[in-house]
Amino acid sequence: MSVDGNTSVNMGMDRDMETGPDSGDAREASGAREANGAREANGARTDDRSAGGGRDGVGGSGGTDAPAGRLQALFEGHRLTPTQRRIAHSMVRRAADVPFLSSVELAELAGVSQPSVTRFAVALGFDGYPALRKHLREVAPAEPAPDTGSYNEYQQAVEAEIENLRHLASVLADPRPVERAGRLLAASRPLPVLGLRAAASQAYGFAYFAAKVHPDVRLLHEGGTMVHDRIDAAVRAGASTLLCFALPRHPREVVDTLAYAKEAGLTVVTVADSAFAPVAKVSDLLLPAAVGTGLAFDTACAPMLLGRVLLEAMCDGLPDAQARLEKFDARAAARGLFVE
């Protein structure tokens, strides 16, 4: 993936409803969203996280040597429908398992119909799904994932998060996107940090620690008309970059706010659950970290860890970061702030 800020990742950026043979698939995906919509009040998960690619997106690959990277490279350059992007997202998240999945199993994983998987394979230039799977076994060989069938649902949730962290580690094999993000965050004075609804805690955690080393961090964790005013104020004060944490379900307000921030001249760096997330199209640099979806409420260990990695990269771009930390520690000791 490009990290020079000039190249777009074409994953089918149009959001129009498809027509022709795949139109039923679009309705199917929409129906899945509606079925899960009743759980929004409880913050429950939905598997529909497909969207267009953003500029400078990492894409969840970790370089083309990793299985996820080879999958991502396979999808690039193809104009995929929303249903097909849904399948692609599921494949990237389970890159090690995909070469061993049948079309029915992949359809179940992505929450689409089996014919949708067949059409997806044809859209990528293969005769059908068997040909696609054969290709995946040749270019992305991997051992099947350990059998977790005997685990209870809590253990399975932990195992899924461990796999998400492994995937994040493979992404970070190429540190350049995070390093670039760190430089952007360090140079922005002030630095607005946005996170709404499920992502509010991620934004708060980042802003809490960032304030110890960055001279002016501004947390934006409440929506409404005021968020645009606060972005305007940050721009007037000299802000050049906005950091956003975006987790499912993705509020429309976050997409609108990021579009507003870009129009105001800010560079948007986003931590999202997927390179296919709806915020990708309004982000200049997208850093993916998958969330766990096995429990009633999504788990976000990988996005939290990626936030800490970004803090480290930002500190590298702040020459006085260490001095600020030492000064804070001295003041905390004098106040007896922490229990020894």
Image (tube, helix red, strand yellow):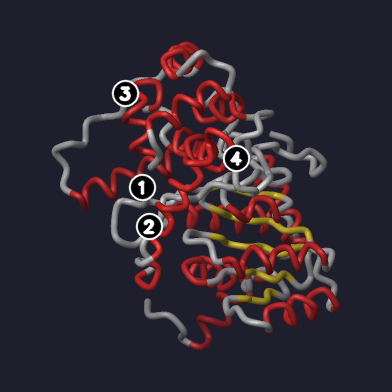
**Sequence-first tag of 2 and 1:** 1
Q: Secondary structure at mark 3?
A: loop
Q: Nearer the viewer, residue 340 or 221?
A: 221
| Residue at the disc numbered 3 | 144
Residue 65 versus residue 93 in the image, above or below: above
**Sequence-first tag of 1 and 3:** 3
| Residue in the image at 70% along x and 37% along y | 10
| Residue at the disc numbered 2 | 299
Q: Which residue sits furthest front?
A: 20
| Residues at marks 1 and 3 touching, judged by CB atoms closer than 8 Å | no
Residue flagged by tag 2: what amino acid is it? Thr
Q: Secondary structure at mark 1?
A: helix
| Residues at marks 3 and 4 touching, judged by CB atoms closer than 8 Å | no
| Residues at marks 2 and 1 touching, judged by CB atoms closer than 8 Å | yes
Residue flagged by tag 1: what amino acid is it? Glu
| Residue at the disc numbered 4 | 19
Residue 300 versus residue 78 in the image, above or below: below
**Sequence-first tag of 3 and 4:** 4
Residue 334 position in % (x across, y down): 53, 86
C-alpha distance separating marks 2 and 4: 35 Å
| Residue in the image at 46% along x and 86% along y | 336
Would you say residue 167 is visible in this rendering? no
Residue flagged by tag 3: what amino acid is it? Pro
| Residue in the image at 46% along x and 84% along y | 337
| Residue at the disc numbered 1 | 161
Residue 26 position in % (x across, y down): 51, 45
Which quadrant, please, contains the N terminus?
top right
